[in-house]
Amino acid sequence: MDFGTGWANEVHAMKRTDSAACRQCKHFRNDAKHVEAALPGLSSLSSAYAAVRCDDGICAVHERYIAASSICPAFEEGYAYAFA
Amino acid sequence: MAEIAHTASSQLLKLRSPWGELFRKEDWWAIWIGLGLIGVAVAFFAGGGSIKWIAVAPQKWSHLSDVTQQLRQHGLQYAALFVLWAVAFGIGAAALGIKISRFLPAFLLVYLAAGGLYFLGQWDQAAHYNLEPPLVALGIGLLVSNTLGVPRWLDPGMRVEFYIKTGIVLLGAGLPLTLIAWAGPVAIVQAAIVSLATFGAIYFAAIGLGLDRRLAATLGTGGAVCGVSGAIAVGGAVGAKKEQVSVAISLVVVWAIIMIFVLPLVSRALGLSTGVAGAWIGTSEFADAAGLAAAQTYGGYAGSVPGIAGTPDAAVSAFTLMKVIGRDVWIGVWAFVLSLIATTRWERTGVQSKSSAAEIWNRFPKFVLGFLVASAVLTLVTRGFDYAAYKKEVVPALVAPLQAFRTWAFTFAFLSIGLTTRIREFASIGARPFYAFTIGVVVNVILGFVLSTQVFSGFWNRLGQ
């Protein structure tokens, strides 16, 4: 049995919110596995699945850890690393 | 194709739904699991029964033959308990996106190792040889992960925060709501004094050393509020650089692990009561899991180390009140205020953050709600019993089994801390962030000690009685 990235995410996270925010940007990645891999030690005493993280993620353009509601001129709509 | 499917579903993680939050964050799963267990326990108790058969726990032993006898007698119960935990945590892990086929084998090993540690803690000579289960779990985990290495297939089973949050929700069942209402305000006052002083010390030391404001704020919140969780919450809110968040995480983890050993050791040397030591640990430790390891260790000294007053549970209770109620719940406020300052006062970064008061709720550590509900439920259920009846009927049938569940959950977490801490993978810290954070550690520890042992000592001593 494999639930992929999480059935709860797939069932409940379909709603599109503010357009042109980082959460829709191809340079932004905020899935928990990626965040934990990018920030060593995070899972030792906390977690990328924690509520305090909200939907924060990593911007590949600015190399910053940012809120998903942020905006910037480098925005490009698309799926992060879709065909990389 | 598989990559496209994976990426598309990853993209869904970026989108947010208010109701999806209830199933895609481990805080909520800790609530569902913790309150679910409490609900079943209460239902059995109300019907005149108990869940104690499945809430099996090692008993005191003197010789290895006692252990084998316990295992022979209760082997089926231990197997059933594994199935219960595997189902509960497995469903939660699957919803979070962890492959259940990878979670279960890893969790089996965690369960077996935790069982071994639980048994070790029940050895009648354990205290004599300083073999407190949290410290042994941490020590063995650190040694293995930093020498032999831990196979990657074990990673899915080592969810420190998932286990510790579930344990904290279960802990709520052992703390009457009246006690939380009585002690909560004092905890908030003490924690506020220390949090503000520690944040100020780290932040201004970092600025004085020429560090970036966003790094200063991330370090400050990591030291002052809730450790790694505080660092990632504020790091994201202010838009810190990725490596700045990594530096803060590394510093918090290193100091938190040092403090797991130092705080109980110093408290023991000074003969602090369990309530006072728990309050000090709650004020001066940096993370929930680390602090609970230290507090549970110290609670274990009560009754076994001469000169340490107070009940074993008082250390964990005082720690939880101080850390969870006094510090953790304010992380959303810190994140909101600092994001407001960052967006209006600090230099621009190329990314524009949106500061909103909704941040206060969005970043609220939701598992605290489960802790409070658990406390309210048990307070309601037990309100009709006098003290004698409570001891005779409620404790063995309802409270003790829930305590056993809690100890299991904490032991899973303590073991996982050491096994997931791979120091060689940490970000290079640099001298200036280290100095800034260490100044905050000194302020935090001294101030926390003075407040716990002098200013509010009478209060924390009473809690331990």
Image (spheres, grey):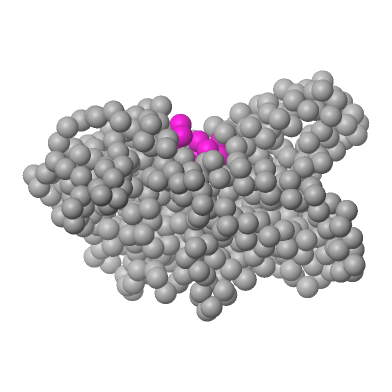
Residue B433's place in the image compared with B382, above or below, is below
Where is residue B355? Give x, y as percent: 25, 36
Horizontally, residue B400 falls left or right of residue A69, namely right
How many labels, in total? 0
Where is residue B428? Give x, y as percent: 34, 72
Residue drawn 72% across the image and 22% down it: B380
Residue nearer the viewer, B443 or B121: B121
Is B146 colored magenta in this rendering?
A: no
Residue drawn 61% across the image and 66% down it: B138
Where is residue B392? Give x, y as percent: 90, 34
Q: Is residue B293 visible?
A: no
Report the quarter where the C terminus of chain B lies.
top right
Residue B131's place in the image compared with B416, above or below, is below
Furthest residue toward left: A73
Horizontally, residue B314 falls left or right of residue A26, namely right
The dominant secondary structure in magenta is helix
Residue B187 sits in quarter: top right
Horizontally, residue B111 falls left or right of residue A75, namely right
Residue nearer the viewer, B201 or A19: A19
Furthest residue toward top: B384
Residue nearer the viewer, B178 or B56: B56
Residue drawn 67% across the image and 43% down it: B84
Residue drawn 51% across the image and 74% down it: B149
Q: Is residue B10 visible?
A: yes
Residue nearer the viewer, B52 or B106: B106
Horizontally, residue B133 falls left or right of residue A39, namely right
Furthest residue toward front: B1
Q: Which residues are magenta?
A: B22-31
Is B24 colored magenta in this rendering?
A: yes
